[in-house]
Amino acid sequence: MGMRRKLIAGNWKMNGSVGALGELDAIAAAAADAPGVDVAVAVPATLIELASDRAPALAIGAQDVHDRPSGAHTGCVSAAMVKEVGARFTIVGHSERRADQGETDAQVRAKAEAARAAGLHAILCVGETAAERDAGRAEAVVTAQLAASLPEGASGDWLAIAYEPVWAIGTGRTPTVADVAAMHGALRARLRTLLGDEADALRLLYGGSVNDANAAELLGAGDVDGALVGGASLTAAKFVPIIRAAARL
Ligand code: PEP
C-alpha cells in the first residue's frame, strides 16, 4: 500500500470550454500543495493542448482514444494524436462509452493497449449496473469485466483501474464504504491471479458521485488508491477539497 501514491483524476466529460480552463490554475496550485498526491484532469479532446500549456504541472489527459494509430475512422482520435498535443493519459472503458457507444471489453482492452503503445498512461473503468447489484452479481460482473478488458503488459507503471458503479455516476448516490472496500478487495484479488505480484502496484480508484463531503471517507476505504471524479472536477471550488482530502490521508 505504501508504494501506491494517491491519484485524484477529474473527468470533465463533454463539459468545459476555453473559458473554463481558468479553473485549472487553482487546481494546479492545490496539486503543488499536495506533493504526495498525483492530480490529473481528462478534458475534452479540443482542450487538451490549451489545458496542458496552461497547467504543465498537471497531468492532462483524454477521455477516450481509438484502438488504431490512424486510418479511416471519421470523428475519432488516436492515442498518438492526443499525446502529440500534450495528453499524458487517457480514460478507457468509461461506462458512458460502454453504454452510449456500445464499447465491448475487447475494444476497451485494445484501446488500453493502443494508449500504452503511444506512451500514454491509462485509467480503465469497470462497474456494475443497479440491476446487477440488486441481483447480487456486482462482484462477479465487475471482476469479469476486469479480466476481459485488462490489457497485455498491464502494470502499475502505466495503468490504473477505476471501479465506477454505473448507478453511482452523476446520481449523488454512492455505495457504502464497506461495499467499496469489498469490491476493491475483489479487484485486487483478481489482479493477483492475473498479474501475480505486479497486482500490488496498480492503483484502484473509486468513482461515482465523489464530492467534498464524502471524499475522505471513500478515499480511506481499504484498497482505495484515489478517485475518478466527474461533476465535482469541473470547478476548482469542488475539486480542490477532494485533492486536499487525499493529501490528508
Ligand atoms: C465519472 O464521470 O467518472 C464520474 C464518476 O462522475 P461523477 O463524479 O459525476 O459521478
Image (spheres, rainbow, N blue to C red):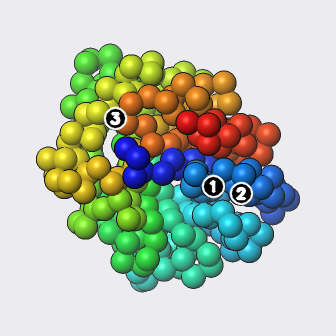
Most foreground residue, 94 or 242:
242
How far from the left and from the top, in percent, is residue 248?
Answer: 62, 37
Q: Which of the two marks, 3 or 2, is nearer to us in this view?
A: 2
Q: Which residue is mark 2?
A: 32
Residue pointed to by mark 3: 184
220 left or right of 29? left
Crowding around mark 1 (Cα neighbors within 10 Å: few <14, some 14 to 19, many 20+) is: few
Return the residue nearer the eye: 2 or 44: 2
- Label 3 – label 2 distance at C-alpha: 28 Å
Q: Label 2 is placed on what type of residue?
A: Ala
Residue hosting label 1: 35
Q: Please, what secondary structure does the residue beneath circle 1 have?
A: loop
Query: Ligand 1 within 8 A of label 3's CB?
Result: no
Disc 3, disc 2: CB below 8 Å? no
Quarter of the picture holding the C terminus: top right
Q: Secondary structure at mark 2?
A: helix
Circle 2 Cα neighbour tier, 10 Å, few/some/many (<14 / 14–19 / ≥20): some
In which quadrant of the rendered view does residue 239 lie? top right
**Element class at badge 3:** helix
Q: Are marks 1 and 2 in contact (CB under 8 Å)?
A: yes
Residue 135 vs residue 182, the one in the foreground: 182
Q: Amino acid at mark 3?
A: His
Q: Does the numbered disc 2 mark a residue whose Cβ is under 8 Å from ligand 1?
A: no
169 sits left or right of 237 in the view: left
Q: Residue at x 41, y 70 (%)?
A: 115
Distance between the Cα atoms at labels 3 and 1?
25 Å
Choose the circle earlier in sequence order: 3 or 1.
Answer: 1
Front disc: 3 or 1: 1
Choose the circle earlier in sequence order: 3 or 2.
2
